[in-house]
Image (cartoon, coloured by chain):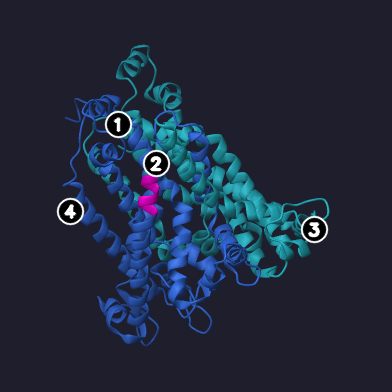
Chain colours: A blue, B cyan
Amino acid sequence: MAARKPVRWHIAVFLAPAVLVYSALMIIPLFGTLLQSLMNKDAAGERVFVGLQNFATLFGDALWSDAFWNALANNAWFFLIHMLVQNPIGVALAAILSTPRLRMAAFYRTAIFIPTILSFVIVGFVWKLILSPIWGIAPGMLDAVGLKALFTPWLGKEEYALTTLALISVWQFVGIPMMLIYAALLSIPDEVIEASEMDGITGWSQFWKIKLPLILPAIGIISILTFVGNFNAFDLIYVAQGALAGPDFSTDILGTFLYRTFFGFQLQLGDPYMGSAIAGAMFGIILIGVCVYLFGIQTRLRRYQF
Amino acid sequence: MSPGRSIAAHAALITWTLIALFPVFVIVINSFKSRKAIFADPLALPWPENFDLIGYQTVMKQGDFFLYFQNSLIVTCASLFFVLLFGAMAAFALSEYRFRGNTLMGLYLALGIMIPIRLGTVAILEIMVASGLVNTLTALILVYTAQGLPLAVFILAEFMKSVSDDLKNAGRIDGLSEYRIFFSLVLPLVRPAMATVAVFTMIPIWNDLWFPLILAPSEEVKTVTLGAQVFIGQFVTNWNAVLAALSLAIVPVLVLYLIFSRQLIRGITAGAVK
């Protein structure tokens, strides 16, 4: 074989830079971290293999597990809000935007996507200002419509802080589902729409019966992207509430928990081994989510070809 | 479409547009006002009587902000360049040639779309410490290049499949090397896709706080995002300065986004997500 066919070096040349950088900085560190999660220090400070003991500590030892399960539960709630609020709003906006002959569609599309391009630092700061009870634009605005009684310092109360942050994140990222669904809606051929109109299906029922089934694969992709993004989130909580994810850890999610564990905070020293174990747990959670999507959902989605 | 439905559609879109832009508006108008005016009436527009550039003056006097901007620009542009170049090269190899392990290589490179690079931070930091790259822009550029590659390869490969084979074969008959075919035939044809990839790659890099915080926190290599975060911490009571700094941090990424946004929707619709 090899003798008959010359080696096609150009394929290797084309692939090499990407594969090298990607392997060296993504795959190898990822496996390095997974490996390190199986190590710990012994009494003399030497690095030893401890098997799954770090994970046993993380899931079972009250010192660690309380914080871990708290972060996981918060993260699940964070994700749930995105699924229930961000994605329906994104789909609705895209559906409205894709109405034929809508004026200024490009303007709306561009404007609604702007929060997505802002840095978390800006987003965290401005929402803290708006919701602040002292400077507060929010209390003033509620006052103007006679609803001042509804105002509380949402970011400062344990029972509201996480939900508030999740909604801020929804505000920021709703542009992504909107763009992707919009693209999916535009790619539905006109003949299909016209055929449904011939059959007298228009307006809302056209959306529910014709368009929605056709964009389900895109909604599936968005769900999994949301899942990966949420279980990897860190920045918004860090800039709004600090690494301690206050008040009283009520906004702690896996990303902030990983950061605190690995780098330490206040009096606690950083612990690279437990940090790796948390990263390993996050890896597992994301992997499970991706597998559920790939094998459980994606294969059942009906795809239509035109 | 009936006028009633059209009005309803516009009403819904305008409502969300206002919600989306309101916070940005609050930052920008207040950055031009005097301290008293910010507190007295945060929603008032800057008029001559309360107009004040003290915030911008403070930021300028700080001086470091230009350095931060420069760092962010270097990191973003260099990473973007490498992601687009290496990503397009790999995508071309995967979409153009049939070779053993092609599918496997595609899957290997796509893995990074689903698994976030942050989970490897612990080991990345060790690598950077070992190679002496901590607190250099190179460290950030390398990490961001790795971070951006999977999605770039995935999207660009989809697009390159649609570039006509006849064109490439005509080039081959004319004696063009495979490298010339890639650089002078295929690359210009996938420009919309490159713009899409550029937007999706650029925004997270420009805004990232995690890696600058961990890999390059020292003064001379701080990025704007980290700089603004630290600035907020230091000037927590000097809102003029903070608001001015934030307004300045919005501008570059906004300009880039507006430049690319036309290409963006064309790029997405043309096949990246179907």
The reply to whether callout 3 and callout 1 are in contact (CB within 8 Å) is: no
Where does label 3 land, which residue? B54
Q: Of the two numbered discs 1 and 4 on the same chain, state the one appearing first in sequence.
A: 1
For label 2, count other residues whose C-alpha is less than 10 Å away and answer few (under 14), some (14-19) or many (20+).
many
Q: Position of residue A35 (x, y in %)?
A: 31, 67
Q: Position of residue B72 (x, y in %)?
A: 60, 50
Q: Is residue B132 left or right of residue B104?
A: right
Label 1 – label 4 distance at C-alpha: 25 Å
Q: Of the two numbered discs 2 and 1 on the same chain, state the one appearing first in sequence.
A: 2
Residue A94 circle label:
2
User: What is the chain letter for disc 1?
Assistant: A
Residue A259 circle label:
none
- SS class, disc 1: loop
Where does label 4 land, which residue? A296
Query: Between B158 and A183, which is closer to the camera in this rendering?
Result: A183
- SS class, disc 3: helix
